[in-house]
Image (tube, rainbow, N blue to C red):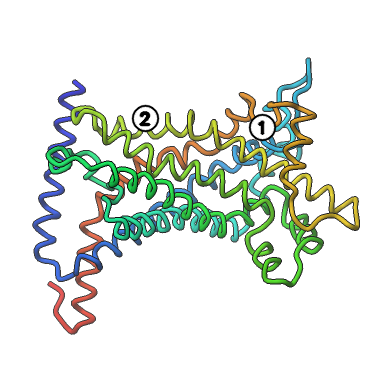
Amino acid sequence: TDACESVLCRQAMVSVEANNSELSNKRTLSTSTEQAVLVTYRSIGLGIWGASLRFCGMPLEKIALEANSGRVSHIPGGPSELRQAIRQVVKRGWADPWRVVTPRSLWAWFVQYGCMGLAFQTLDLSISRMLNVPPQVFGRKIFETNKEEIAHPQDTMTSVLFVFKSITAPFLASVAESAVANKAEVMRYLGPATLKHLQARTVDKSILGRMYGACGPAFFPNVGRNFIMSATSFVITPNLFHQLPEEHRTPQNLFVLGLVMNMLPGNSLAITMQSLWGRSLDHLNHSTQHSPTAPRMVNYRHVVTSAYQQHGHRAFFTPSKLVSRVLMNTPAQGTIPWFANVVLPKWEGKVLDRVDALAIALRGGVIE
């Protein structure tokens, strides 16, 4: 049955690919223009997908933020960290998590996922050209076997450069993602009023201070978490899937693999950065409220040391933290490999046709 499903899926993809290939011969767009259109289309699609799921799962996000902060802790014989987090979130009603969602949050979710996709694809293509290495495969190509690669395997230097590119692209994409999303995340965690008070006490008028104010506090743990998740979604999962035998490369298996990779290696590492992010904000907020000479920047070494002295490894990793993080992140982030490589490619041909028709009209041609 699985073999039949695999064959049917592959036949459907080949049919779509052949149709798109036939249409592409009639298009007047250059290869670089088509590539730019597809990158933009995928980025907008990822932004809408991520923002929709994150808004629907707002209570789960609040539970994850509370569970990975210093506001809950292990109490022998008492309620679990997860139960403490849930009580904190719903103490003013089940609708309370959505009250901190502002238009900026909705825009930030869209930009976060869209920017993540746009930055990664752009950086991946640019660095690939600079280093003369293959770009990351997207769409239907992820289900196909590259016979050229089998006949002519990469040499050692090319493999090293490919690994370097596969690390650099998601890291730089994560910096861009955090630059547009971290401040909104801080606002959802602390609340708009607390963030405004915090930045009034910590942001100065220097260039560095203005950058700090624009990106929000606890920026570096946010970058670390996003790097782990970006690398998992855009590099590790697709490349691991591409190494499977061709008969097992089905959309269903990609969907499952994306969820598994997100839950286990991805979020198992990301919750350490998420916990550092939450504890850093709690530390900075507490310091500015109780000390007129509070530091303007987070002292990460102090945060890690004091947290470890009080709670040991539980300060950064517990099953409750992992469960809460998985419930919040996996629906949106874990489905990105499937959504980007299975769902979005279905309309790529139509998008290119519309753009091509618009380009012809702008040049004074006639749209058929």
- Which residue does the numbered mark 1 point to in the structure image? 316
Tag 1: residue type?
Answer: Phe
Q: Are marks 2 and 1 in contact (CB under 8 Å)?
A: no
What SS does tag 1 mark? loop
Q: Please report the residue visible at 22 percent of the width from the left and 75 percent of the height from the top.
A: 359
- The reply to whether residue 29 is in sight is yes
Tag 2: residue type?
Answer: Val
| In the image: residue 327, left or right of residue 359 | right
N-term mark: 2 or 1 = 2
Give the label, 2 or 1, closer to the camera.
1
- The reply to whether residue 86 is in sight is no
Nearest the viewer among 185 and 88 is 185
> Residue 253, percent across and down?
30, 30
| In the image: residue 19, left or right of residue 128 | left
> Residue 337, percent across and down?
36, 41
Nearest the viewer among 148 and 85 is 148
Question: Badge 1: how crowded within 10 Å, few (<14), some, or many (20+)?
Answer: many
